[in-house]
Image (tube, rainbow, N blue to C red):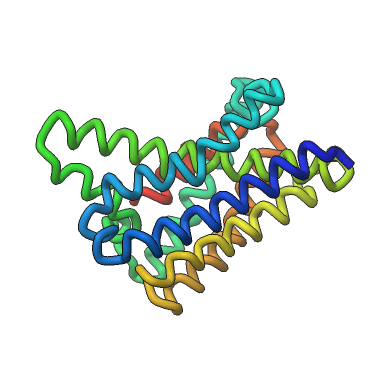
Amino acid sequence: MDRFALFAAAVTYATTVVGLWLFYATLGVDYLRANIAVMGLLSEFAFVGLLPFLLALAHGDGRGTFGMTVKGLRMSLALGLLLVAVETVLRLLARRPLLDPSRNPAFWESFNYPLPHGLLLGLLNGLAYGPLEVFYVVFLAVNLDKALGGYEDGALSKGVVVASTIFGLAHLLNIPFQGVRVAFINSVGNMVLWLFRGIIFRRTGCSLGVMVEWSISNLT
């Protein structure tokens, strides 16, 4: 067992859950809703993306460890866009709008700020709720695979299953904003879809296609 990998995954996830819970409890739902563009960005960087980035740097992990490489890019993009197409069909069948700002208010509310601040805030929120979240889940999956005994060739791994599950469960923190029913549905949906995203990453060795797909899915 790789103890550093287990430590990295456990501390990263605990920071997300405990940090976000304290963040929400301290500031309150009403304040967060009124300032969602700035507070959403702050919470994503502080409790989701920052720690895994620092741990990866401290451990000397290269970009390729997390699939940020051109190797396998074409297949990663192709599978990512295929997943976008599937999600689009499911939305149409469910009679849901293809562009729904309520899915990610932090991103869309950014553009209510005057230029150029609104544009910069929107860009940063787009990066935070898109590529940064993918890096977060991939970081968990890679380190959990190391902690659980390594990764053998194949599309699905223990790390991907566990990372997808706990990332989905983290969305239950949105209950104060979305209500129990919607937060539960989003939690289960994220568990399932992140299994497919993890498969794309593990099959191709590239996470860039997933970053494109998740950005489209999560921001629209």
**Image-quadrant location for residue 4:** top right
**Image-quadrant location for residue 64:** top right
What residue is at 41 percent from the left and 40 percent from the top? 128
Residue 132 percent location from the top left of the image: 49, 38
Q: Is residue 55 above or below residue 86?
A: above
- Do we see residue 150 in this rendering? yes
Residue 71 percent location from the top left of the image: 65, 22
**Image-quadrant location for residue 80:** top right
What residue is at 55 percent from the left and 32 percent from the top? 208
What residue is at 70 percent from the left and 27 percent from the top? 65
Which residue in the rendered view is the most extreme toward the left?
114
Q: Nearer the viewer, residue 19 or 193?
A: 19
Q: Nearer the viewer, residue 8 or 104?
A: 8
Residue 90 percent location from the top left of the image: 45, 63
In-image side of 96 versus 149 (left or right): left
Residue 150 percent location from the top left of the image: 86, 40
In-image side of 123 versus 67 (left or right): left
Q: Nearer the viewer, residue 215 or 50?
A: 50
